[in-house]
Image (spheres, rainbow, N blue to C red):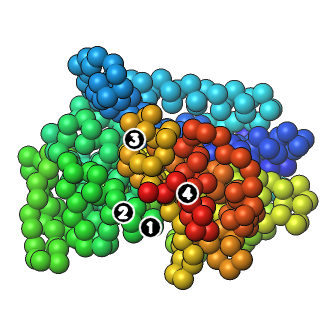
């Protein structure tokens, strides 16, 4: 092992949380090192958010082209192949990874192309080198959950699905959460016969019930099995699942099997031996400043096992770096974290889950002028208000919902009232007016609601 290297901050993992922390700290004058055993950008850039949205954008364009006649344009034959989508995805991912590498180099961050493990207090082994850092941020992410029942060759998780070069004739998706539903969206539009098996009583169980029901009603070419558990898996020519439902057992067959039942935190080697505290989710236990139980060691992102979103990891990185730099007032706030699902239509929400007894306003996409110019009519926005008219939750199922939710997140985070939310002038015609109309409906003053 070479001579020990010293850093003010060393970051383990170069995903959204890791590289954000490294860049912020370096730009504040700290000596920063970062290690990554795979590619910069982490799961989000390489095997998750970006690849999925690359495919989804291509499919959105294909759907519009197939619908050209409704836009007054002569239709032409269009088709998409998984091989071509994969090539486009690889090009996009490669450019983003190189962009992150460039930013780290420009900021003077020492990049180690190796995994890092703990040797002792504030001492790490990174490849063949020893590193000591005054502060350490663990941002090692998570990996797809794969119980022993599904330990079979050829089975897909989100780590492997984007390596496919040809769409299967049929696909069984176990798990109807965000990843499962986005995969159902992608493959059903590529001509694959898709079946989604969900253990809970509805898909997208973290979203409002009317969102779940609305999406299922729109995805008529996808079979949904809810309150269904996989009891056995057989591998032959494809996969045969024995599924237990409320009405008994059923065997279903598919050419391919995709497992989307959650993700497990990935801890650096040697960390458990240091006596670090673990939370109920199996991730690193942290406080409001993102500190673990080990002195000088912080954790951000999926490795905490809690809020597994790239945008949360980046925000947690900001809080951790602020604390390392001496700001003892800043703490992580999870009360206004947007959830986004890139189905068709898109789904987004922010705020409290429990809305029983709250005042409610809603407005349909079908009544919005901008939506009609886009030939869109499915979906809605709903706003929930607590005492004093304070916005507590916003749910959107509509085109561009994942963009519009940012304004709603600001309103919820700042505890705006309906009156304050309606204060600005909303440009017309836009999809953002969906929120304006829903807020007006919460007051009983929506003049445009059918």
Q: Badge 2: few (under 14), some or many (20 or more) residues near its Cα, within 10 Å?
A: some
Of callouts 4 and 2, the N-terminal one: 2
Q: CA distance from mark 4 to mark 2?
A: 28 Å
- Specify which label sits upstream in the sequence, 4 or 3: 3
Q: Residue at x 17, y 74 (%)?
A: 245
**Where does label 3 land, which residue?**
376
* Residue 267 image-quadrant placement: bottom right
Residue 212's disc is: 2
Please give the label number shown on residue 417.
none
Quarter of the image that includes the N terminus? top right
Task: Give the SS element for disc 4.
Answer: loop
Q: For the C terminus, which image quadrant? A: bottom left
Q: Which mark is residue 447?
A: 4
Residue depth check, mark 4 versus mark 3: number of the one nearer the observer: 4
Label 1 sits on residue: 208
Residue in the picture at 23% in, 31% down: 166
Of residues 150 and 341, the one nearer the viewer is 341
Most foreground residue, 143 or 380: 380
Could you give the CA–CA distance between mark 2 and mark 1, rounded to whole angstroms?
7 Å
Could you say where residue 250 lies in the image, as x and y percent from the top left?
9, 68
For the question of whether residue 79 can be seen, the reply is yes
SS at mark 1?
Answer: loop
Of the image marks 1 and 3, the number of the one nearer the N terminus:
1
Marks 2 and 1 in Cβ contact (< 8 Å) = yes
Distance (Cα) linking label 4 and label 3: 21 Å
Where 166 falls versus 28 (above or below)? above
């Amino acid at each position: 092992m070479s001579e020990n290297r010293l850093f003010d901050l060393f970051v383990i993992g170069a995903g959204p949380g890791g590289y954000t922390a490294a860049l912020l700290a370096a730009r504040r004058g700290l000596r920063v090192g970062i290690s990554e055993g795979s590619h910069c950008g982490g799961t989000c850039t390489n095997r998750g958010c970006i690849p999925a949205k690359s495919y989804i954008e291509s499919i959105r364009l294909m759907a519009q082209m197939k619908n050209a006649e409704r836009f007054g344009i002569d239709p032409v034959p269009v088709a998409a192949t998984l091989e071509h989508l994969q090539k486009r995805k690889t090009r996009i991912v490669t450019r983003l990874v190189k962009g992150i590498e460039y930013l780290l180099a420009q900021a003077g961050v020492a990049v180690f192309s190796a995994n890092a493990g703990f040797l002792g207090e504030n001492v790490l082994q990174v490849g063949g080198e020893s590193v000591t850092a005054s502060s350490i941020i663990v941002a090692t992410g998570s990996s797809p959950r794969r119980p022993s029942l599904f330990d079979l060759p050829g089975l897909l998780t989100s780590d492997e699905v984007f390596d496919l070069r040809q769409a299967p004739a049929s696909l069984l998706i176990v798990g109807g959460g965000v990843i499962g539903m986005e995969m159902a969206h992608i493959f059903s539009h590529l001509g694959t016969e898709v079946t989604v098996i969900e253990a809970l009583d509805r898909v997208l169980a973290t979203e409002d019930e009317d969102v779940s029901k609305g999406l299922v009603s729109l995805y008529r070419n996808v079979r949904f099995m809810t309150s269904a558990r996989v009891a056995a898996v057989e591998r032959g020519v494809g996969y045969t699942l024995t599924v237990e439902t409320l009405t008994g057992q059923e065997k279903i067959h598919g050419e391919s099997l995709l497992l989307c039942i959650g993700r497990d935190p990935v801890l650096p080697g040697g960390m458990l031996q240091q006596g670090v505290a673990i939370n109920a989710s199996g991730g690193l236990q942290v406080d409001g400043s993102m500190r673990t139980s080990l002195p000088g060691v912080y954790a951000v992102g999926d490795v905490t096992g809690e809020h597994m979103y790239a945008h949360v990891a980046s925000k947690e990185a900001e809080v951790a770096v602020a604390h390392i730099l001496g700001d003892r007032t800043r703490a992580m706030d999870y009360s206004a974290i947007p959830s986004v699902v890139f189905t068709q239509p898109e789904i987004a929400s922010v705020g409290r889950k429990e809305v029983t007894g709250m005042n409610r306003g809603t407005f349909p996409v079908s009544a919005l002028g901008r939506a009609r110019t886009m030939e869109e009519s499915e979906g809605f926005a709903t706003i929930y208000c607590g005492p004093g008219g304070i916005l507590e939750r916003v749910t959107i199922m509509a085109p561009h919902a994942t963009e519009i939710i940012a304004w709603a997140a600001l309103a919820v985070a700042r505890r705006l009232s309906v009156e304050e939310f309606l204060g600005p002038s909303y440009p017309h015609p836009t999809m953002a007016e969906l929120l304006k109309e829903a807020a007006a409906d919460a007051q009983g003053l929506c003049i445009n609601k059918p």
